């Protein structure tokens, strides 16, 4: 019966298909409900058929729990003020809370460098921050929501946490403020991750303990299997959104001209090999009209990522999550951009990728790299980033949610 299925509240973005694919594939075993936006957006995209709720339709996190009555709550993250309140209320009431990893994570230091660079660029552009702030009335409503979520006895501690976090934010970046103020209020019961190694960010920033991690691998990679590996007549570039991003109000890490120059050099190499260049676009760049155009370059928005990767002659990229299955099965070349990704050095050290500098590489560099079959230490690649490539990650997630 439908009423016998566990009710799982997903505090989760649903405007990107890849984010909700795992839940869509196991939905017959659960009653999933969604909570993500503060208020209903004008042009809401929802890649599920799950019931949807909005934070500010509720007076408090207690009201959310009272109305939805979840058996478990799964978060993308818990550091946002309403998420912290909901996590705390659930733990008080004995409702299990889970943070589920949703993409390859960078080390804490990498995220900090990212924020520092984006803030510097925002200031250079005459902005006070690279983040889009809420309006004053929304902030007041969120504060009331947060304070109403706690009992008279727990309110002083919850208010103290919020006040201290606000003070720390004045002199530190958000990510630093959170690290300097660890709190049980925002730490979930369990952290379901690809690997403990790749999720070390939570330990550094939030003090998550080793026993709170549960490794399952990435359900997105379940369909990558050896029998699907081929060598079609194209090279693949897995695009990362590194130019200006309206969605994040970010100045990016490179100009469009620099990115187009990179595309042209990759295309020169592909032409020399008698192959096409296929560029798998990140969703944030689907509507970018400034990409260089060439008859030999094919831009792909939505497609079969498994086939695109496993049938390519070789793969290029920066640090997309999709680089991981590519590195397991294919020759991979990653572009470095300053100290942009510690993970790139990790993957190079275990023989899974080759690195070339973004601004100065040549088509000849790519020819040299792709001419030699890479021999990664697959054991280390699994231990550090993949856990297993046995097609069983989704079933492990399902079993964990049912337990």
Image (cartoon, rainbow, N blue to C red):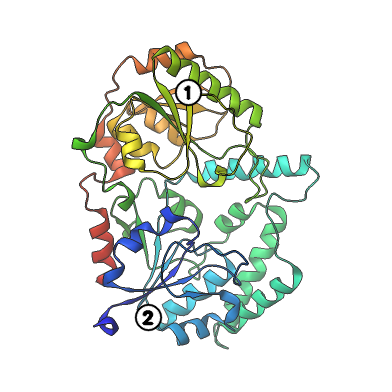
Earlier in the chain: of badge 1 and badge 2, it is 2
Give residue 73's position: percent from left, percent from top: 40, 72
Name the side, left or right, on which 57 lies relative to 308.
Answer: right
- Mark 1 surroundings within 10 Å by alpha-carbon count, few (fewer than 14), some (14 through 19), many (20 or more): some
Residue in the foreground of this view, choosing between 165 and 322: 322
Give residue 153's position: percent from left, percent from top: 55, 87
Q: CA distance from mark 1 to mark 2?
A: 57 Å
Q: Is residue 282 above or below residue 58?
A: above
Give residue 389's position: percent from left, percent from top: 24, 44
- Mark 2 surroundings within 10 Å by alpha-carbon count, few (fewer than 14), some (14 through 19), many (20 or more): few
Res 50 seen here: yes
Q: Is residue 123 above or below residue 297?
A: below
Q: Quarter of the image holding residue 324?
A: top left
Which structural element holds mark 1? loop
Residue in the foreground of this view, choosing between 204 and 197: 197
Q: Name the residue that disc number 1 marks.
A: 296
């Amino acid at each position: 019966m439908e009423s016998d299925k566990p009710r799982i509240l997903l505090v989760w973005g649903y405007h990107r298909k890849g984010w909700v694919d795992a839940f869509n594939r196991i939905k017959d075993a659960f009653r999933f409900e969604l909570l993500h936006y503060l208020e209903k957006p004008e042009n809401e995209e929802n890649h599920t058929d799950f019931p949807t709720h909005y934070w500010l339709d509720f007076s408090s996190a207690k009201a959310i729990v009272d109305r939805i009555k979840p058996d478990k709550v799964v978060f993308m993250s818990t550091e946002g003020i309403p998420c912290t309140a909901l996590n705390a209320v659930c733990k008080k009431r004995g409702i299990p809370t889970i943070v589920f990893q949703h993409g390859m994570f960078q080390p804490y230091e990498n995220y900090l460098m990212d924020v520092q660079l984006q803030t510097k660029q925002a200031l250079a552009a005459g902005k006070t921050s690279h983040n889009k702030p809420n309006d004053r009335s929304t902030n007041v409503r969120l504060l009331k929501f947060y304070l109403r979520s706690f009992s008279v006895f727990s309110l002083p501690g919850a208010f103290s946490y919020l006040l201290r976090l606000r003070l720390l934010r004045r002199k530190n970046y958000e990510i630093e403020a959170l690290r300097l103020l660890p709190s049980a209020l925002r730490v979930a019961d369990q952290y379901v991750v690809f690997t403990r190694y790749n999720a070390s960010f939570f330990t550094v920033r939030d003090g998550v303990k080793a026993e709170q991690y549960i490794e399952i691998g990435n359900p997105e990679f379940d369909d990558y299997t050896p029998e699907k590996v081929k060598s079609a007549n194209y090279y693949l570039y897995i695009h990362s959104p590194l130019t200006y991003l309206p969605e994040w109000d970010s100045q990016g890490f490179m100009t469009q001209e620099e990115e187009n120059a990179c595309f042209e050099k990759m295309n020169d190499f592909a032409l020399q090999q008698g192959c096409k260049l296929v560029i798998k676009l990140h969703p944030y760049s689907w509507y970018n009209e400034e990409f260089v155009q060439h008859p030999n370059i094919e831009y792909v928005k939505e497609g079969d990522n498994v086939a695109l990767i496993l049938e390519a002659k070789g793969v290029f990229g920066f640090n997309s999550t999709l680089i991981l299955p590519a590195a397991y099965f294919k020759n991979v070349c990653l572009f470095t951009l300053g100290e942009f990704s510690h993970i790139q050095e990790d993957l190079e050290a275990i023989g899974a990728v080759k690195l070339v500098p973004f601004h100065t590489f040549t088509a000849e560099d790519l020819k040299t790299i792709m001419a030699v079959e890479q021999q990664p230490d697959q054991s280390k690649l699994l231990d550090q980033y993949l856990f297993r490539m046995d097609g069983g990650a989704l079933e492990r997630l399902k079993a964990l949610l049912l337990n």
